[in-house]
Amino acid sequence: MSEVNKVVLAYSGGLDTSVILKWLQDTYHCEVVTFTADLGQGEELEPARQKALKFGIKPENIFIDDLREEFVRDFVFPMFRGNTVYEGEYLLGTSIARPLISKRQIEIARATGADAVSHGATGKGNDQVRFELGYYALMPGVKVIAPWREWDLLSREKLLAYAEKAGIPIEMKHKQGGSPYSMDANLLHISFEGRHLENPAAEAEEDMWRWTVSPEAAPDAAEYVDLEFEKGDLVAIDGTRMKPHELLAKLNQLGGKHGIGRLDLVENRYVGMKSRGCYETPGGTILLKAHRAIESITLDREVAHLKDDLMPRYASLIYNGYWWSPERRALQALIDNTQQTVSGWVRLKLYKGNVIVSGRDSKTDSLFDPTIATFEDDAGAYDQKDAHGFIRLNALRMRIEANAKLKRG
């Protein structure tokens, strides 16, 4: 085991990272710096400071940073410009937070003179890849300590036993006993894994969900909301301009109220296994629907289709931890270029788990021409005879093949 003088730990204050903090002290006998990121998870973060102090961490080595604005402005919004969805359903709420945490962790390592960083991701998961690809991209020579790949506490029950022995408070035990859900939350989503969900045939328990009411319990009356976009980014809701993180928080509130954004998914992890998780992404679900709606009238057809072709690759890059890679940056530059004309407003109807587009327009960038699209007299704006030659040319290769088959009998 190589010598470590100072390590920056991504510290939530929860059970796993509290155990890791104590384990780092006992195993590496090094100075520990804790970093807690406020990404809008909706929890009081000051207890993390008190827990760190209890473990003997120096006050100057405790970092609790409000990253909500940077998270939405520089990570969530750029991702949504690409209409990014992994495996057709997952809006990447956990994946998109990891590159920001890695970035800030490395900044703190440089500022405090640390020679190592540590995280609480397991050796079975995707987050170990996302964190560490970020570390190495931003600080190539840094030492990475991944406790789940080193220690023998390889189950939730062993972790709980270790915590009890070390005097670490154990919170959020399920009322029926056993291990708690493994949860991750930020302004974009909250996820649930483990315990009851490890049986993919079992329906998620209703009392598990935190942000959304069930669609059955949602209001019986639909609610309309107007979203305004400028160059692909949301800038206002119902005429009120807000900061990016405030806009997403507002969409979460609206979506949660109407039972929008629940997902039960078996996904293909980077390490090769299938894993079942449940997700609540109310604001992201609304934002994706609205963004595609404003693009439908402002993007050229082939540009829109090119974006759709590239989206699965872009989504995989984010899911697999390649946010800081040159190929992700290249794709982002292309995506951002397409968004220069994506401005206007979208009206949505929210009703019992559904997001329904009920109107959209752009005063300056709309490519919708009613004089051409009309089913009434278009006064010569479109010559329908032009379609004849176009169709015959596109059918030429199929006609040649069909004639050849006839000759062969």
Image: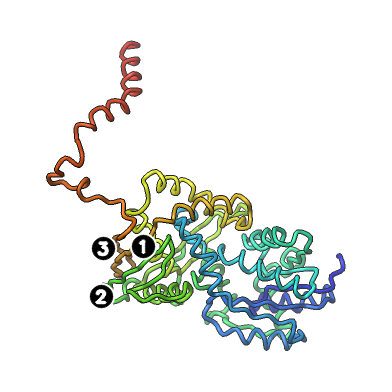
Q: Quadrant of the C terminus?
A: top left
Q: Are marks 3 and 2 in contact (CB under 8 Å)?
A: no
Q: Residues within 10 Å of mark 3 (few under 14, many from 20)?
A: few
Q: Is residue 27 left or right of residue 291?
A: right
Colour basis:
rainbow
Marks 1 and 2 sit apart, C-alpha to C-alpha, by 22 Å
Say left or right for 27 vs 177: right
Quick check: 152 above or below 328? below
Residue 50 image label? none
Q: Which residue is mark 3?
A: 358
User: Which SS class for mark 3?
Assistant: strand
Which corner quadrant of the image does residue 358 belong to? bottom left
Instruction: Say whether residue 302 is left or right of residue 92.
Output: left
Q: What amino acid does circle 2 point to?
A: Asp
Disc nearer the start of the sequence (3/1): 1
Percent position of residue 272, x then y = 61, 52
Viewer-closest of 22 and 189: 189
Instruction: Give the Cα distance between marks 3 and 1.
Output: 10 Å
Tell me if mark 1 has few (under 14), some (14-19) or many (20+) residues whose alpha carbon lies within 10 angstroms of its own. many
Tag 1, which secondary structure? helix
Asked where in the image residue 182 lies, by quadrant, the reply is: bottom right
Q: Which mark is residue 220?
A: 2
Front label number (3 vs 2): 3
Res. 161 visible in picture: no
Q: Quadrant of the N terminus?
A: bottom right
